[in-house]
């Protein structure tokens, strides 16, 4: 049973105080999107063995959603960060790379995301 | 000898007090033990070596071990609700008046019918379950199953409720040390000196592990450590506490026995500790392995360490003429202990060519015969050891000598207890020199930080003598012995037990290998090796060594089976703890719950809520009550406790825009003071909730959800607000419990409410789908003119603390109007009469609003809402989806809920094709006829057509497709 | 007869006001209207007879005597006029229980997965008690636990069970 530290209130909570929300960083496709994009948004999940980004809600606490980077095999937690980030933060990436030098991000950083200001 | 039995020694026994005699019963006979005994030691002291029978062959069995690893001496303990099967006699403290019974025997322990299996062992080989019962098929039902059912099952399940209570507790600690032996206590002291908070868990009532028994000054060493630890404020020493499993991120479960020793103490019997450990020190020791020689399961053949435990700890002689058989030096300690207790040690049989270490030499010096390069070829005796047949270990088992003896103390070496280490991913490494699997400290179980979260010490790490702390002299290496003698015949292997509890022998594992089983996990399941309640604690290593030899591969290549928690079985009561009876689930009660209860409500669980289903009066059936309530509402006025409906405030400059995304309809255009019905879908397009939203002010809406939907829909809103539209300015608050809500329904509803005063409720002042703030009966209230019944209806919300007051005032004022409280079933009937859908009846997670004729509640103007894109997918837009219709039974029978309408032809599986199903069905008291709704292929285009609903064993039901609105199609009644 | 681990009492006459706002922007206005300083994250500021509890990064709970609620709602609403904020009287939504006595912490250790021993004197911990949500703060020689009104009986049953005489968690 995992323990994760909520980045919104700083409380380290155990899994029974949290609510899981599946894979993080999904991009929503709405009306007008292609069938393929929409299907992938709804159903295609990476389900990796290793580094993974997940959504969790501190349900029995501050009620905020946050994101966690962890290894699905060793259960190592690389860090938690706010849900408003479109991609894992540079700090999270650095923390993963320190432990998993071979790991490569599979996204390209967009510089002007307004959410970045939320990551202290 | 003392009067607690002929095998009680006159002195010795560090854990017992001969001054306190404890009478108890075993299999109906009276026995006497002493304070400090286990049941096993007390029975042994009385000369009762046989304590049970094995699972498959019903072989007579005595204790093999002295601790938690015991596979044989399993008893049914207690009576009635306190009966518990499969309790280990070796770890159960003896209590005065205890009642214990042997298992797996019928009619009695000494005369057992099932022992015929014993003669049939050639016919019950490995995998016999899989082989024997395949053909002929008919034999299963008539022959195999009845026989197996009769003899199968380990112990009996209790039949009464457990009268004991249990509890749980959470603990957070820097370091947990599992095992209160010398290695654990030393590690705890070292860590505590660094200032860490330390908890030490010891499964036994006494501290020290093997050290007090095995080392001359052991007890003094332990006492010194304990007194040091007890003086430290940051150390907690917890006895009688078994660490059962280690899980993710340092989560450790442990069971503390609180009142096992005193059922009348009036406190919980056991406590489950849920410990979050920063680090775990595994100091769980090691378990001795049996030797695989023919007849190694005869009562009286006992592990060497257990023999010296019975002598040194309990002052009990397991036998008076003892033969020690070993492949290592440690077993010589047993010879010395027995000699010190005045018992005869007739020989030590050592498989090794030489035994010249300090321990063997000291045994020789006491005049004991030590036979090296020797082995046991067999045991004379079936229910007890009578004599031991000696052979050369290097040979095939030719008997060289027969030695009379009544007890064999065997040692095949030791296996570290690596369970906790392994539970959460710690890896093992094979030590050739020690012939054991050791924790591989380079591959520990990892915690949240990616670092090892456990460290093995002492015997659990392979340091059997813990010489650093005990000062024990070095011992000579053991010689691995997996089959004794080395070239034993096949016939002998039929009598060499590996798994004593499940009756798995060397011959079974070799047969499995011969039949092609290579994976240890497959072999385990095929032979049932290690699958009994002891989970192979003493058998696994011997079993996989035999398998490796049969497969002609090294042991590490075969590997081990998976170690899974719990280490020893947990009582279900500790897992449930307080969650039983009234506290089984949190039962949610409205402010009017007590009134409903006092007025005879029959309850319906809705989520964790209890809602009145109906209020039966004396002599009334539930259906009578529902019919009366419906007619009373339609003919006068009734009240429904609607407090459970979800109520969520949504406020902010972007609240309208947000609700337009949440609902399929348009909520932003709702005028202040008005209400609107809305549908909520998930991103898959499926309908998940419905309800009425009211606009409270320019930037504030109050959203009603279904009873079960309040928390779910609030969470759904927060998810989208926090994670997708996080820059929108919207706050939500789930205020469900702040308000009590009463639906006042029926043609007299307005008359009744006007009596309570405070507001103009005329159709002009408060039109249908309007709401107003008011004071009713002196209570501040919000009144929503909405209807789920088709009648004139007002839902009155007041602060929860005043809900009961409002309800009572309504009933006082409405007495002459025949005011009637009604329950959820009358509500359901009335909504069905009106063709209103119900979430959970008409929806099941695969239904979209378009299926339900609710297209009018889906905005065509909006470019987006949650679920819109999904509803454009081809399958969702298909004209072949089943759609909502009314169903009118043609023979006066009510359609069964959920039945399917058949179509022409059959599908690929030879089943009738389907064209619809019933989603709601009731008898309408208003119309005095059965009514139903259902989803039917092309339903709305097939008005008047007949459908057939076959039901097994009954005449098919037939129904006509009709409009789902059965009552008041014009909707005039909502005006009163 | 041994003594219970703690005295469990149901607290009445506690009013509660839920405040949601951008605490950085509106903190001063809220503090002024409440008469209590804004608490740090997961903390609580007590200024008798009021307590201002941090519930989430954009949510506070003002606990005050029931009689003072209407006036405080008006004051807070006025103070936050023109800002994006939410002020609600939620006095009827929750129940509060006192858990007093030397072993009060042990009662909560049986029900809550939170490490309450490490909770500071001014801490406000939201967690769960067995199967329901709750909030816990220190008060007097024990704690106050708040939970939802509908499960008051359940909470009372849990607390009384956990406080049963003779069930102290001390090693035995």
Image (tube, coloured by chain):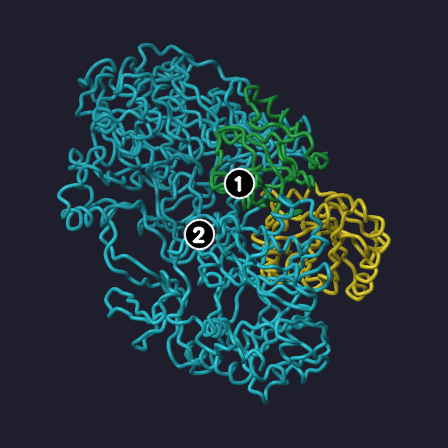
Chain colours: A green, B cyan, C yellow
Residue B974 visible somewhere in the drawing: yes
Is label 1 or label 2 in front? 2
Q: Quadrant of residue B669?
A: bottom right
Q: Quadrant of the N terminus of chain B?
A: top left
- Camera-nearest residue between B630 and B340: B630
- Camera-nearest residue between B134 and B671: B671
Residue B360 percent location from the top left of the image: 38, 15
Q: Are marks 1 and 2 on the same chain?
A: no
Chain containing mark 1: A
Query: Dot 2: what SS?
Result: helix
| Rendered position, B50 above or below B840 | above
Q: Which residue is mark 1?
A: A22
Residue B387 visible somewhere in the drawing: no
Q: Is residue B516 left or right of residue B412?
A: left
What crowding class fits label 1: few (fewer than 14 Cα within 10 Å), some (14-19), or many (20 or more)?
A: some
Q: Quadrant of residue B888?
A: bottom left
Q: Which residue is mark 2?
A: B876
- Camera-nearest residue between B156 and A26: A26
């Amino acid at each position: 049973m995992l323990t994760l530290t909520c980045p919104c209130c700083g409380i380290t909570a155990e899994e029974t105080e949290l609510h899981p929300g599946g894979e993080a960083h999904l991009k929503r496709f709405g009306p007008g999107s292609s069938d393929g994009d929409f299907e992938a948004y709804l159903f295609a999940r990476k389900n990796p063995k290793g580094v993974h980004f997940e959504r969790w809600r501190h349900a029995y606490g501050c009620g905020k959603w946050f994101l966690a980077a962890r290894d699905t095999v060793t259960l190592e937690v690389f860090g938690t960060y706010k849900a408003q980030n479109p991609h894992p933060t540079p700090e999270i990436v650095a923390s993963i790379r320190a432990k998993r030098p071979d790991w490569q991000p599979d996204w390209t950083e967009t510089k002007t995301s307004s959410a970045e200001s939320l990551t202290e | 000898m003392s009067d607690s039995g002929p095998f009680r020694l006159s002195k010795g026994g560090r854990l017992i007090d001969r001054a306190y005699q404890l009478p108890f019963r075993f299999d109906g006979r009276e026995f006497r033990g002493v304070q400090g005994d286990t049941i096993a030691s007390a029975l042994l002291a009385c000369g009762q070596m046989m304590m049970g029978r094995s699972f498959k062959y019903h072989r007579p069995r005595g204790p093999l071990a002295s601790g938690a690893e015991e596979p044989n001496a399993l008893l049914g303990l207690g009576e009635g609700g306190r009966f518990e099967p499969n309790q280990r006699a070796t770890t159960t403290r003896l209590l005065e008046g205890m009642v214990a019974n042997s298992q797996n025997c019928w009619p009695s322990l000494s005369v057992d019918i099932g022992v015929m299996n014993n003669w049939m062992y050639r016919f019950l080989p490995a995998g016999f379950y899989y082989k024997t019962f395949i053909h002929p098929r008919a034999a299963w039902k008539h022959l195999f199953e009845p026989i197996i059912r009769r003899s199968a099952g380990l112990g009996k399940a209790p039949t009464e409720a457990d009268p004991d209570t249990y509890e749980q507790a959470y603990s957070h600690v820097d370091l947990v040390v599992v095992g209160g032996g010398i290695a654990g206590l030393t590690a705890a002291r070292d860590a505590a000196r660094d200032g860490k908070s330390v908890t030490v868990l010891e499964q036994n009532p006494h501290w020290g592990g093997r050290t007090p028994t095995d080392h001359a000054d052991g007890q003094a060493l332990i006492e010194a450590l304990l007194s040091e630890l007890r003086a430290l404020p940051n150390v907690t020493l917890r006895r009688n506490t078994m660490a059962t499993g280690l899980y993710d991120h340092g989560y450790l479960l442990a069971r503390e026995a609180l009142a096992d020793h005193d059922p009348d103490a009036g406190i919980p019997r056991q406590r489950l500790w849920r410990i979050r450990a920063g680090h775990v020190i595994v100091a769980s020791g090691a378990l001795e392995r049996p030797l695989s020689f023919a007849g190694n399961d005869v009562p009286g053949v006992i592990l060497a360490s257990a023999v010296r435990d019975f002598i040194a700890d309990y002052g009990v002689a397991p036998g008076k003429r003892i033969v020690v058989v070993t492949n290592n030096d440690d077993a010589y300690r047993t010879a010395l202990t027995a000699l010190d207790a005045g018992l005869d040690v007739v020989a030590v049989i050592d498989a090794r060519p030489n035994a010249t270490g300090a321990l063997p030499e000291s045994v020789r010096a006491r005049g004991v015969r030590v036979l090296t390069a020797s082995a046991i070829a067999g045991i004379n005796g079936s229910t007890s050891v009578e004599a031991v047949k000696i052979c050369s270990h290097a040979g095939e088992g030719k008997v060289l000598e027969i030695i009379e003896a009544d007890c064999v103390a065997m040692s095949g070496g030791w296996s570290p207890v690596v369970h906790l280490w392994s539970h959460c991913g710690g890896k093992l490494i094979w030590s050739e020199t020690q012939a054991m699997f050791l924790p591989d400290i380079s591959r520990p179980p990892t915690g949240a930080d990616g670092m090892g979260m456990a460290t093995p010490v002492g015997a659990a790490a392979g340091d059997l003598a813990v010489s650093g702390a005990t000062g024990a002299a070095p011992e000579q290496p053991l010689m691995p012995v997996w089959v004794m003698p080395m070239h034993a015949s096949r016939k002998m292997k039929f009598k060499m037990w590996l798994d004593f509890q499940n009756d798995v022998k060397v011959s079974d594992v070799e047969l499995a290998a011969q039949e092609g089983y290579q994976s240890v996990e497959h072999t385990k399941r095929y032979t049932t090796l290690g699958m009994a309640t002891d989970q192979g604690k003493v058998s696994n290593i011997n079993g996989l060594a035999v398998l490796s030899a049969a497969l002609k591969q090294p042991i590490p290549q075969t590997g081990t089976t998976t170690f899974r928690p719990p280490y020893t079985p947990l009582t279900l009561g500790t897992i449930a703890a307080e969650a039983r009876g009234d506290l089984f689930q949190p039962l949610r009660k409205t402010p009017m719950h007590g009134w409903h209860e006092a007025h005879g409500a029959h309850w319906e669980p809705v989520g964790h809520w209890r809602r009145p289903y109906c209020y039966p009066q004396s002599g009334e059936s539930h259906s009578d009550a529902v019919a009366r309530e419906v007619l009373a509402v339609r003919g006068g006025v009734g009240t429904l406790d609607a407090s459970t409906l979800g109520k969520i405030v949504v406020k902010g400059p972007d609240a309208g825009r947000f609700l337009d995304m949440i609902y399929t309809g348009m909520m932003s255009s709702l005028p202040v003071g008005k209400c609107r019905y809305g549908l909520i879908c998930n991103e898959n397009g499926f309908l998940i909730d419905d309800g009425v939203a009211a606009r409270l002010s320019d930037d504030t809406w109050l959203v009603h959800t279904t009873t079960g939907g309040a928390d779910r829909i609030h969470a759904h809103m927060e998810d989208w607000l926090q994670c997708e539209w996080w820059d929108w300015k919207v706050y939500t608050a789930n205020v469900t419990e702040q308000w009590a809500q009463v639906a006042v329904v029926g043609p007299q509803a307005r008359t009744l409410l006007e009596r309570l005063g405070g507001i103009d409720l005329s159709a002009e002042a408060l039109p249908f789908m309007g709401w107003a703030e008011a004071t009713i009966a002196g209570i501040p209230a919000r009144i929503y003119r909405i209807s789920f019944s088709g009648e004139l209806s007002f839902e009155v919300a007041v602060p929860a603390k005043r809900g009961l007051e409002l309800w009572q005032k309504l009933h006082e004022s409405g007495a002459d109007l025949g005011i009637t409280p009604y329950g959820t079933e009358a509500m359901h009937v009335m909504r069905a009469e009106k063709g209103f859908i119900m979430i959970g009846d008409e929806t099941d997670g695969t239904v979209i609003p378009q299926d339900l004729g609710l297209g009018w509640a889906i905005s065509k103007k909006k470019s987006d809402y949650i679920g819109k894109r999904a509803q454009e997918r081809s399958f969702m837009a298909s004209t072949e989806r089943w759609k909502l219709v009314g169903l009118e039974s043609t023979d006066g029978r009510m359609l069964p809920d959920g039945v399917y309408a058949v179509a022409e032809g059959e599908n690929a599986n030879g089943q009738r094709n389907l064209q619809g199903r019933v989603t709601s069905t009731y008898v309408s008291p208003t119309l005095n006829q059965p009514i139903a709704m259902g989803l039917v292929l092309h339903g709305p285009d097939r008005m008047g057509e007949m459908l057939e609903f076959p039901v097994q064993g009954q005449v098919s039901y037939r129904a006509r497709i009709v409009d789902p609105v059965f009552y008041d199609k014009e909707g005039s009644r909502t005006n009163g | 007869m041994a003594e219970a681990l703690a005295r469990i009492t149901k607290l009445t006459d506690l009013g509660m006001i839920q405040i949601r706002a951008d605490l950085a922007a509106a903190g001063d206005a809220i503090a002024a209207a409440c008469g209590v300083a804004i608490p740090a994250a997961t903390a609580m500021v007590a200024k008798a007879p009021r307590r201002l509890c941090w519930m989430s990064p954009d949510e506070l709970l003002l606990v005050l005597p029931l009689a003072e609620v209407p006036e405080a709602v008006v004051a807070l609403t006025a103070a936050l006029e023109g800002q994006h904020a939410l002020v609600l009287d939620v006095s009827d939504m929750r129940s509060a229980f006192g858990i007093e006595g030397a072993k009060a912490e042990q009662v909560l250790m049986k029900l809550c997965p939170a490490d309450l021993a490490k909770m500071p004197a001014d801490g406000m911990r939201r967690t769960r008690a067995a199967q329901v949500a709750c909030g816990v703060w220190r008060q007097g020689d024990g704690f106050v636990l708040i939970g939802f009104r509908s499960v008051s009986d359940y909470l009372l049953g849990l607390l009384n069970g956990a406080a049963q005489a003779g069930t102290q968690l001390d090693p035995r």
